[in-house]
Image (cartoon, rainbow, N blue to C red):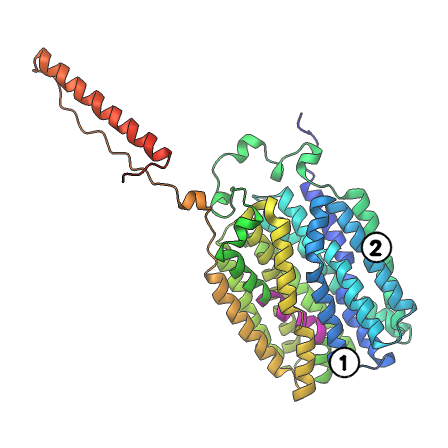
Amino acid sequence: MADKRPFYGWKLVAVLFSLVFCNMGFPYYGGSVINGYMIHEIPMSRSTLGLGFTLINLFVGLASVFVAMSILKYGVRPTFIVGSALICLGSLFMCLYASKPWHYLIAFGVINGIGISFSTLFTAATAVTRWFRRYRGRAMGIALSSPGFAGFAVSPFLDKILRRAGGNWRVGWEIVAATGVIAGLIAFLFVKESPQSLGQSVDGIPEEEQNRPSRTDTLATTYPWTASQAYRTSAYWLIMIGGIATTFPFFFFVAHWILRLRGAGITSTNAAWAMSLFTIGTIGGHWLAGLLLDIMNSRLVFAIGLGIYLVGSYLAIIVRPDALTVAYAAAVLYGVASGWTLTCMSTVTAHYYGPAAFPQLNGVMTLLTSVFASPAGYIGGKIFDLYGSYTRAFELNCVIAAIGIVAVAFAVMPRPRSEVGAPTIHVPREPLVPTTEGLSAGQRIRRQRTKMNNEGCLEAFVFASSIGYTCP
């Protein structure tokens, strides 16, 4: 019997929101602020500092295959718990033991990177894909927007705490470790695997109503794709190119934006505020993209989001200390673009290939996009070390975004081979039969026999077509 309780899916979205808030907002966005203080106690070059962000982004991707295996074998809830525990362990190492650059690279880059992979966007997106179809875009946008709220609150909060602590950056990692414990408890108590586990249905819509034609049918597939089938479509790989164009500018910006502003003569307080505005922008990007993906062609929505990177990069290049508005606008636009395109990448993959294949497809996509995009932090730092400026780094972001726009423009929703190769049956219209009035009895009998023969031939043609028979 169907569960008569209210649909749990939207409550689950709130749970996922809180989990991503804790497990990405604090160690990732908060880490950007904490590391700005750490670099004064543990001396390292900008490229080494950027290498830490390269590693965290890389291991988010490298671990994604294992995240998919964990989700398929154990479920969403245990996967969230494992990730939260790893973030707690990595953060405790940073606050208790880290004293050398390689300590920072291992704890922040490797351990926290794996923890974030297990407990944030990938796992949350899988849960949304299982619970929603018709409202998948907006549910995805809400769940994945929580790092924006966390960054808005966490960056100035941690900066204030660390300034009051006399620049003691280890206090910040103690706070991050505590949020990992809280996230693990939330996952244990409130995460549910699928609507079927509660006797409910996708979107909270009865089965009979789901079978009715709707606008969603043109946006999201109903075909049960397998991962191996999806890998053979060009659309999947074009979406992946768009994913690289999504993540490379984002990884670079998080690693170097505060340093870019400080180098331009902007105070640490205003730089932290600009980072907060960046995270606010991600909120708007996630929500706008989510709404549009439920009603518009997903390729167009994706391309618009990548285009916003171009404007944001131009403003980031011309930042000056006497024009804080430009710095704030650049931060907001980069936030909108990153949130917008990240929602597009996950939702388009789910729309094109469905929930069954999504964990594997998203795992491979996260792996490859991270491998190609994770060097952004290191490359940005290396460019600065070579030229003493971030201008060429932002120009590189523009080139990558333009390549992504071209790729997603050609990423048409694939059709299964069974549909592409199916014969199109053109049933001939029945000829007009003149009236039999005035005909003799013999003529009427011959007319009736001709009609029966024609109907028999038509039935034979339809049968032969249905079994794939073609004329030699």
Q: Which residue is mark 2?
A: 85
Instruction: Please say if 464 is above or below 451.
Output: below
> What x and y, as percent, mark residue 471?
27, 38
What residue sits 37% from the left and 33% below the top?
Answer: 466
**Residue 294 left/right relative to 108:** left
Q: Which residue is mark 1?
A: 267
Residue 321 in view in this figure: no
Measured Cα–Cα span from mark 1 to mark 2: 35 Å
Instruction: Please say if 44 is above or below 277.
Output: below
**Residue at disc 1, secondary structure:** loop
What residue sits 47% from the left and 51% below the top?
Answer: 414
Question: How many C-alpha atoms fall within 10 Å of the one at disc 2: few (<14), some, or many (≥20)?
Answer: many
What residue sits 63% from the left and 51% below the top?
Answer: 360
Count every numbered label the image shows and give the total: 2
Given residues 81 and 145, the one toward you in this image is: 81
Q: Which residues are magenta?
A: 245-257
**Of pointers 1 and 2, the one earlier in the residue sequence:** 2
Residue 248 lies within the magenta run: yes
Callout 2 amino acid: Ala
Quadrant housing residue 121: bottom right
**Residue 415 left/right relative to 208:** left
In the picture, the quarter occupied by the C terminus is top left
> What x and y, as percent, mark residue 133?
58, 44
Instruction: Please say if 370 is above or below 455.
Output: below
Q: Residue furthest top?
A: 441
**Residue at disc 2, secondary structure:** helix
**What secondary structure characterizes most of the magenta part?**
helix
Residue 313 in view in this figure: yes
